[in-house]
Image (cartoon, rainbow, N blue to C red):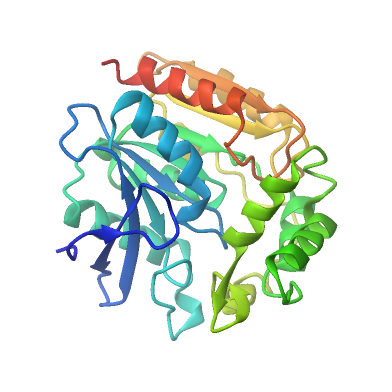
Amino acid sequence: MPDAQKPHPEMTGWRSRFLSAPDGLKLHFAETGDRLSPRLPVLCLPGLTRNAMDFEAIGNRIAAAQGRRVLAMDYRGRGLSDYDPDWKRYDLMVELDDLMAALTALGIERAIFLGTSRGGLLTMLTAIVRPQAIHAAILNDIGAVIEAQGLARIRGYVGKIPQPRSYEQGVMTLKQIFGAQFPEESEASWLAFSKRTWRDDKGTLVPRYDINLMRTLVDLDLEKPLPELWPQCDALKPAPLMVIRGENSDLFAQSTAEAMVARHSEGDFSQPARLHIAAKQGHAPLLEDEAASHAILDFLDMADPA
């Protein structure tokens, strides 16, 4: 069972909850909104090295506008969850087991899933192993075809980013890595991104993830075509789907996004699908701008009306 709730140390208006993974490792969830709301909750799943803090802004918007319960997961080895002593268990199937156990412990039988990158992959896998849990899905810059150039870029920096001496220095580092994909972000946005990327550990800034995650990417053969995930995407057909793509994304092609939306609308059991392009953003859209917020809120209202 989850521990008693307490305020999240860094996310305004959010609470922290801890529970045990199937192997006993401690997992963290951030939660906001009304647990007793009659509207379906939104479950937010972050990217490979990311954490629950990425959903602070959009989660607060959803909770304030629609009164929904919103939860955001820290996978093992990220955020406030425990690090795994065996880096080989930083694996999608292990994380899927963690997620299934968490849904049961948190009392979530059905939800709207919002998955960024790796979180989108977990959403698709959930549609296969526990389809009744997904009422609707939002996939943020991820889909049936993953572009090798984007994955190569990610492999090039995971666990290898120089350790900054301050959050302001972290901004300069992040601009060097992501500036081409996010050319119009404000200084305030970059500083917030820096604070979501590193944490203060007794005066030293350290990553908010286990750098051993880099070891899971070493053996990827990016010279060969990556397996396509159309069957996994098709598992979401019974649910309303929203696809978000960063205009500058090198991981998720425009043609793939358009094909997913068209394919999702085919068949007797298909549900509506929407496509939103996050202008001037790359992988993965931050979901903090007004256009993205309005698009997500409108989709939630369509999928689960008040």
Q: Residue at x 74, y 63 (%)?
A: 168
Q: Is residue 196 above or below residue 306?
A: below
Image-based side of 75 in relation to 254, left or right? left
Q: Which x, y percent locates residue 30? A: 35, 54
Give residue 154's quadrant in the image. bottom right
Between residue 276 and residue 176, name the one nearer to us: 176
Q: Is residue 51 above or below residue 143?
A: below
Which quadrant of the figure contains the C terminus? top left
Instruction: Say whether residue 245 is visible.
Output: yes
Which quadrant of the figure contains the N terminus? bottom left
Between residue 191 and residue 267, name the one nearer to us: 191
Q: Which x, y percent locates residue 49? A: 57, 63
Q: Residue at x 45, y 59 (%)?
A: 10
Image-based side of 297 in relation to 279, left or right? left
Q: Residue at x 53, y 19 (%)?
A: 274
Between residue 115 and residue 238, name the one nearer to us: 115
Image-based side of 1 in relation to 45, left or right? left
Between residue 99 and residue 127, name the one nearer to us: 99
Q: Which x, y percent locates residue 197? A: 61, 63
Give residue 203's quadrant in the image. bottom right
